[in-house]
Image (cartoon, rainbow, N blue to C red):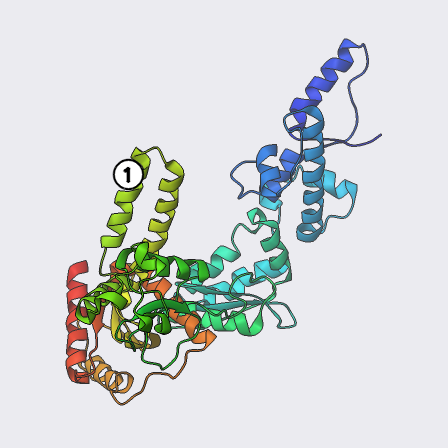
Amino acid sequence: DGILVAHNLTFDQSFLNAELEREGRDPLSNETLCTVRLARRLLPGLDSKGLSRLTQFYDIDVDGRHRALGDAEATSLVLRRFLSQLAFEHEIETVDELLRFQHQSYQTVRSVPGHIDEIRTEVLPQVPEAPGVYTLKKSSGTPLYIGKAKNLSDRLRSHFTAVESSGARKRKMLQKVRTVDWTTTDTELEAILLESRRIKAKKPRYNRAQRCYYSRPFIRLDTNHEYPTVSWTRRLETDGAEYYGPVRNTDQAEMVVDVVGRFFELRECDDDRLRLGQRCLYADMDRCGAPCETQEPEAYAEGVDRVRAFLTGRDPSVVDRLRDRMRQASEDLDFEKAAQIRDTMEQLERILEKQRVAAAPVRRHNAALVHHDNDRDDRVDVLLVRFGQFQESMSCAQPPSPEQQARLQERCRTVFDPSTAPPASISKREATEIRLLSHWTYAHRDELTAVRWRPNQSPEALAEMIEAAVTESSARVE
């Protein structure tokens, strides 16, 4: 009297009936339920409706797949997921309704609940095609998820399209969404920064990343001494030292400091040891030029300049030397060593590529970043950065109008006021946003032109350089 459930029912039922016929018995007359039919109606957006794809989609782990018992277990677990989805999306509660559903035409199957249809028809048409931040909320107004978008309209439509083929976590979230809010921004970078602040303030349940501010390590070049040293720290002080970064974590910070020690031979001893004038272990390991013995500050200063060029991504020699060492290790069949060098080299390349746009310590990163988005030929964005931190942006036509030129000069006078002192310290939030700026500039490095500001440069002169970069950027794209 039970219901026969199978994946691709016709195929399995034919084998069962053939065996019954061989035994001289009547064919099965039970009610039947085909999970392939259910999959076609519940998951039309899924690329395949095979049992392997369904177990992968629902993250079901079954031993003995492609064996009778394993496939039967997998089918039963997939059916459980279908029953849950049917109850929510189609309000199916009885066996009769379930059996009828598998035979419904695709046109009559309502794939999503009413609140999703309402958002699709009433909310999404109002969403602008602009950068910004959006919030998916419960009926109570509680944020469920906060996201950013280069194009709000496209991004939000992607959330509410092919809902049935989304992962379980996303479907569970969309079950609760009742309202959608958004805030437009002038640029994608501003959307990235605003998203970070809002996630940390609201901590929505379905945002896994960016929920807290973390202390990021910076590389510190202590230039207060005749013989400078390199170390890493989580705090930026107004102590005259130069700070580069931030980098992702302490492992990266220690790796950079180690590379500087191995390739540039700056001292690693403390001031007390230096004053003793005694050669130390680092010198014997060829990790230090032993300034305690040589007493040649001019030669040491040249090494410091090379370190600056390295930390700002302008000196590729270290990466080149690492590549040579990796090749040599491979030729010597020391593949473990070659892999270690490769990993170090790849990490270093990513770090230095991000530093190349800034090309200065954090507190001396003062520039206008001219961004020509290849997807938006009607405008060029100008992003103003002071003391390593994003300040504001403005959009310019091509070429800039007289009004835009006047506004650009006025903003340059404010942002790049020589009398403005650098911040005494940098908070966790500011360090996080410096890192987000670094990520964004790295991702868009082929679309950016950096116009650097020098303290002795007038705002008018800087504005003229920016205007020239805007015009040149437009001409290059054309």
Above or below, comparing residue 31 to residue 220 in the picture: above
Residue nearer the viewer, 98 or 194: 194
Residue drawn at x 16%, y 75% is 465
Vertical arrangement, residue 82 with respect to residue 14, above or below: below
- Residue 109 visible in this rendered orientation of the protein: yes
The quarter of the image holding the C terminus is bottom left
Left or right: residue 330 compared with residue 41: left
Image x and y of residue 104, in percent? 65, 40
Q: Quadrant of residue 29?
A: top right
x, y percentage for residue 146? 52, 66
Identity of the residue drawn at 25% across and 48% down: 321
Task: Tell me the element at label 1.
Answer: helix
Residue placed most toward the observer, 58 or 337: 337
Displayed quadrant of residue 208: bottom right
Rendering coords of residue 134 (x, y %): 49, 68
Is residue 12 found left or right of 337 in the rendered image? Answer: right
In the rendered image, the vertical position of residue 71 relative to residue 57, given as above or below? above
Q: Which residue is mark 1?
A: 328
Q: Nearer the viewer, residue 286 or 359?
A: 286
What x and y, as percent, mark residue 103? Answer: 66, 37
How many marks the image carries: the answer is 1
Tell me the kind of residue under disc 1.
Answer: Gln
State which quarter of the image contains the N terminus. Answer: top right
The residue located at (51%, 65%) in the rendering is 210
Q: Is residue 131 visible?
A: no
Look at 15% across and 78% down and name the residue there.
Answer: 464
